[in-house]
Amino acid sequence: MGEPFLRTLTRTTILALVLGLVLLGALPRHGSILSDYVDAFTVAFCFTFLGHYVDRVLLVLPGIRSGVGPLVRLAAWFGGGLWCGVIARWLWMHYGRDLRELPGLMWGGVFLVLLNGVARRHDATP
């Protein structure tokens, strides 16, 4: 069984707060620093929170940890990152921001693969 929802929410929110700072420096400015940070945090939160549940669903699949399972998991992280990117882009538009300010949708898949790869490596350390 997975961790409790509030623990997941807290952990992914803290990670999104940090990633939001990184994105704040990488994305173009639009308004005040606070409103720009909220926009960047939202994008980061889409990947940290939803990406966690993409991985939780994958871990339920039988054989995902052996054979070609890790490759399937990697491909599913990429696909899940595309969906996280779609949601982040939808919110970005609703904040009145221009989608051209964000990297292409494919980079959402790459970002979630990297994020989950780093998170899994961190979880595996003793």
Image (spheres, rainbow, N blue to C red):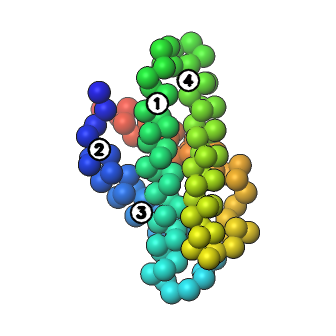
Residue linked to disc 2:
5
Pointer 4 local density, CA inside 10 Å: few below 14, some 14–19, many at least 20: some
Q: Amino acid at mark 3?
A: Val
| Residue 57, disc | 1
Q: Is residue 44 left or right of residue 79?
A: left
Q: Quadrant of the C terminus?
A: top left
Viewer-nearest residue: 26 or 96: 96
Other-residue count near label 3 (Cα within 10 Å), few / some / many at <14 / 14–19 / ≥20: few
17 left or right of 70 in image: left
Marks 4/2: CA–CA distance: 25 Å
Residue 118: tell me if it is visible.
Answer: no
The answer for how far apart the CA atoms under marks 3 and 1 are is 25 Å
Q: Position of residue 79 (x, y in %)?
A: 63, 38
Q: Earlier in the sequence, mark 1 or mark 4?
A: 1
Of label 3 and label 1, which has the lower sequence position? 3
Rendered position, 31 above or below 63? below
Reading the image, the residue beneath label 4 is 70
